Amino acid sequence: MFISLPSFLASIEAGDPPPLSAPLRALWLDARGDWDGAHKCVDAREDKQSCWAHAYLHRKEGDLWNARYWYARAGRPPCEGPLEEEWREIAAALLAAEA
């Protein structure tokens, strides 16, 4: 099921999640203020997309050592830009991968 970024963002505002992969659900929950729920979505997963979302969550939490570990597992360099930009980059990339 293809979901555009605008539709994904609108679902966050509406509070009704569409069917989502674990890393997208993590981003959705994070955007709704549920960091713990978001972390549970990706904590036990080892695919690169989940590792990327996991890295973002630990960076947001301020646990930079742990974030660097998950960026490495995702095959990505650590992000140093604004968190909001990284969130949108991850969401756009994951949505495109599922298209």
Image (cartoon, rainbow, N blue to C red):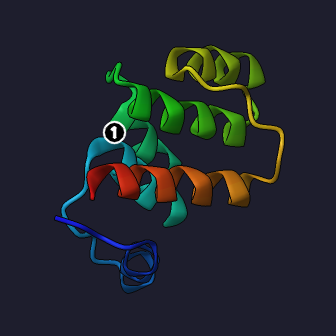
Q: Residue at x 27, y 59 (%)?
A: 99
Is 76 above or below relative to 60? above
- Residue 84 point in image, percent of width and height: 70, 60
| Label 1, residues with CA under 10 Å away: few <14, some 14-19, many ≥20 | many
Quadrant assignment, res 79: top right
Q: Nearer the viewer, residue 29 or 69?
A: 69
- For the question of whether residue 33 can be seen, the reply is no
Residue 31 in percent (x, y) is at 53, 63
Q: Quarter holding the N terminus?
A: bottom left
Q: Mark 1 highlights which residue?
A: 41
Taking depth in this image into account, of 6 and 61 the one nearest to the observer is 6
The picture quadrant where one finds residue 62 is top right
Q: Nearer the viewer, residue 7 or 12?
A: 7
Give the residue type at disc 1: Cys
Residue at left offset 50%, top offset 39%: 53
Q: Secondary structure at mark 1?
A: helix
Q: Is residue 61 above or below residue 46?
A: below
Image coordinates for residue 65, horizontal then vertical, percent: 74, 16
Identify which residue is drawn at 70% across, 35% down. 59
Q: Position of residue 2 (x, y in %)?
A: 24, 67
Q: Is residue 72 left or right of residue 32?
A: right
Tell me if residue 56 comes above or below residue 65 in the rendering.
below
Q: Is residue 32 left or right of residue 77?
A: left
- Of residues 42 and 73, which is closer to you in this image? 73
